[in-house]
Each structure stands twice: as C-alpha cells, then as structure tokens.
C-alpha cells in the first residue's frame, strides 16, 4: 500500500477539498468578503437555492451569480450599499464527499450549518444545507467552478444578506 | 516516513470512516431511506438511546433494531405507514475518532448534530449526540456491524421518525 | 507523488490535529473534566474571549488561565464548588486549518459549535466560535501550548460553566 500513488493522491485531494471549505468559511465568518470571489474561477457560478426548488428541478434561486464580476458586485452591495442589521456568521462544515477523481474537474459535496449571532443576542441556527461543488485545479490551488448551496431553511432566509 | 505503510493505512482508514459517515448522512438527508440498511452488514444492530440511560448502563432504548431485515421494516414503516408531518433532516458530523486498528473490526466514534426543518419553518436543533460504531470491512467497503446513537436531546425526541 | 515525505507529513499532521480536537471534545462532552488539563502543556494558556473584544484587540476575556495548574483549579471549582444547574455539552468541530508546518510549533484554527441540553429540555445552540491554537509536539503527542476560544455568542454566556 505504501507505494500506491492513487491512494496518496486521493488522501491529498480529500484534504485539499476540506481545507478549501475551511478557508472559504473562515473568510466569510471573519467578514473578509473581498476575499470571497477569489475562491472561484473567473467564469464560475454561485447559486443559493431552496431545497424544495432544487429537488423539483425548478430554476428559481435566491442568489444566482454567473461570474466573479457579479460576485464582486454582490460584495460591494453587501458591504457598501445594503442597509441591514449587523450579524456574525459561523460555519460548521462536515468532511466533504469527493465524488469524482477526474484530473481536470472534481465534484464534491458537504453538509453545512451556519449560525447567526446578532449583537447582544443568542446564537441561532441560520441556514443549514448542502454544498454541491465543481472544482478545478488552478495555479493557486483548487477553486470553485460552481458552488450550489441547497438550503433546507426556507423561513429565515428573508434576511440572508451575506453569501453562505 | 514516506514508506511507512502503517501511517498510510491509518490515513486511509480515517478517510474511509469519515466518508462512510458522510455517505450515511447524505442518504438520510436526501431521504434515500431505502439505501439506509445497506450501510450495515446483515446481522448488524442499530440503536438510538438517551444518554441518561447509556451512562447508567440501562437497556431502554428509543429504537433497537437487530438485523438489516428489521431496518428494512423500519424504513417501510417510516415511508409507507406512519402518518407524520414531513420534515427535512440535515446532519453535520465531526471527524471521527477511530479507536481501534484491528484488521477485522474497527471502532469509531463521532459527534453529530441533526437539524430539522419543517415546511415553511426555521431550522432547529433536532438531535445532537454521539455515534458509537463498530465497523467491518466487506467486499463493498466498510459497513456498520453496530451503530449506537447516544443522544443528549431528551425532549424533542417524541417526534423522532426517521433514523439519525 | 508517492514518495513525497512532505505530503505524507502534512496529511499526518492534519489527521493528528483533527484527532486532538475530537479527543478534546469527547473529554468535555463526556464530562471527563479531570482529563481536560492533560490536553495542554504545563505552561499553556486557555482563553475564552468574546469576538467583539478579540476583533478590537481588547484584553478582556471571560476565562483566562495561564497554566495547567490554573486549569486544574478551574476543574475543581466547576466540579466541586460551583452550584449550577446541570447540562450536557456536545461539540461539533469542523476540520481544522493547519496554518504552520514548522517542526516545533504548529498553528491551527477550527470552527466549533457547542450545543447544550438541560435535563428534560430541548438541545440548543450554546456557544459557537473559533478555536485559535498553538500546538507543540510532546512525547505523548500533540498538546496545546495555547487555545483561544473566540466566541460569537455574547448572550448565553452568562451561564458558561464548563470549558468549551
């Protein structure tokens, strides 16, 4: 087993995907929103969709961005123009399921829970769901070609401001 | 260190256990209940027990199934015969502690949180606890010989319908 | 790639850190508080600080212990002298970001969620935040030289009794 490159590569890929998820979460939770588009390739998509719509194959999504430029616009909107009550986010993400081992495109899924804390308030469950990702390898490491956040939490989403 | 088969095997086993937990969670969260018994060997046990009883060594458990056949019955009951309000589950599971490295039987533990979302409602903490598992290696990969779910959450459990 | 010791060491270190976090969580969740100081080296620090203070560089912390001796005192206080309503804790911790690979000192961060369950009550989100750790290698494996728990949850903390 010790000389098996496939196993080592599989272990390394698993670690890379989990580390990407952790770094992504850290950027959002620490409100480094300007770093957020950098986790994606230029023509990547970012979608936040209710599970009910996803399960039925319906297209309606809460957020649907189709390039890094649109993500930068979103960040500008969120940090500069949208009036909203401040809150902290905290992501807890399970180890990912890396479903594809192709050299040029990797599929991954991971369950997430995002907790929200408003100033002076108790932490609450904000948004739980599943990341469905396509990743590609770039010179700077793995990046998202697409990230689809399918969320269970229909209710509280009225006030979703920041990306999850 | 590079040629150490033990380390590599340990890394591989850790990944396998975490992947099994992730696949198990995905099956339940996506309501593929018919896949659930397949995570167990034929004569496996599945038990859901309150922590209070577990800590005192008392036998009473909320669910106690002693074969894959009983699990299939449970799935049939849950999906076909029990009348209950629908809800989504979402599992977030920590990396497991793999405590035994014996060739033929593996022990593992992992903390889990399951969130429940009812239609139109906010997500809430549903059941948190610890998986205490015995695993065996089969031709199809690791499978549970026993999974014991020890839950902290005494209260909300009146309405536990699906396996956790 | 198969003969690359650096990759293997990196994988091993990642596993070790995640396992340390899991063992730490298990000790607290199972109320083995007397084991808790053993996760630290003798002159280690343990700090629990609100995110607001941490972000502003303010020193005020909810708990600030500066040696294993102080931790043992804390455990004694918590288990023997403080009168408080009992509750269960359950930690769910994400895979850590291991930021430094130096031989003698390792930096790591991980997001955590701690759930609290009072007897007969529903589980609730108790404390969410981020572990910011410095680790050193000892004869007994990795140990914390410092663990800083930066929590989002300002509100419920009035009643923080046990370490997180």
Image: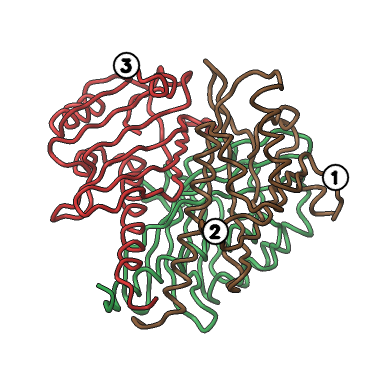
Chain colours: A green, B red, C brown
Tag shown at residue C60: 1
User: Mark 2 falls within which chain?
Assistant: C
Residue C83, given in percent of the width and then of the height, sits at 70, 18
Is label 2 in a helix, a strand or a loop?
strand
Percent of width and height locating residue B94: 46, 47
- Does residue A79 appear to the left or right of B41 in the view shown? right
Crowding around mark 2 (Cα neighbors within 10 Å: few <14, some 14 to 19, many 20+) is: many
Q: What chain does mark 1 sit on?
A: C
Q: Position of residue B43 (x, y in %)?
A: 13, 35
Q: Are marks 2 and 3 on the same chain?
A: no
Q: Nearer the viewer, residue A40 or A59?
A: A40
B32 left or right, relative to A118: left
Q: CA distance from mark 2 to mark 1?
A: 28 Å
Label 1 crowd (10 A; few <14 / some 14-19 / many >=20): few
> Residue at position x 46%, y 55% from top?
A131
Tell me if C43 is positioned left or right of C57 in this view. left
Residue drawn at 47 percent across, 35 percent down: B115
Question: For residue B13, which quarter of the picture?
Answer: bottom left
Give me the residue at 65% from left, 46% from top.
C129
**Residue that numbered label 2 is attached to:** C142
Q: Is residue C161 above or below residue C97?
A: above
């Amino acid at each position: 087993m010790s000389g098996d490159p496939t196993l080592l590569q599989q272990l390394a890929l698993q670690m890379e995907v989990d580390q990407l998820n952790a770094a992504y979460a850290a950027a959002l939770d620490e409100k480094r929103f300007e770093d957020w588009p950098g986790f994606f390739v230029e023509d990547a998509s970012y979608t936040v969709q209710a599970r009910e719509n996803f399960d039925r194959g319906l297209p309606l999504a809460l957020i649907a961005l189709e390039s890094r430029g649109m993500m930068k616009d979103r960040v500008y909107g969120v940090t500069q123009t949208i009036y909203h009550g401040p809150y902290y986010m905290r992501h807890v993400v399970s180890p990912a399921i890396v479903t594809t081992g192709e050299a040029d495109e990797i599929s991954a899924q991971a369950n997430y829970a995002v907790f929200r804390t408003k100033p002076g308030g108790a932490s609450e469950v904000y948004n739980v769901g599943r990341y469905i990702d396509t990743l590609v390898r770039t010179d700077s490491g793995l990046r998202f070609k697409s990230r689809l956040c399918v969320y269970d939490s229909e209710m509280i989403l009225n006030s979703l401001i920041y990306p999850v």
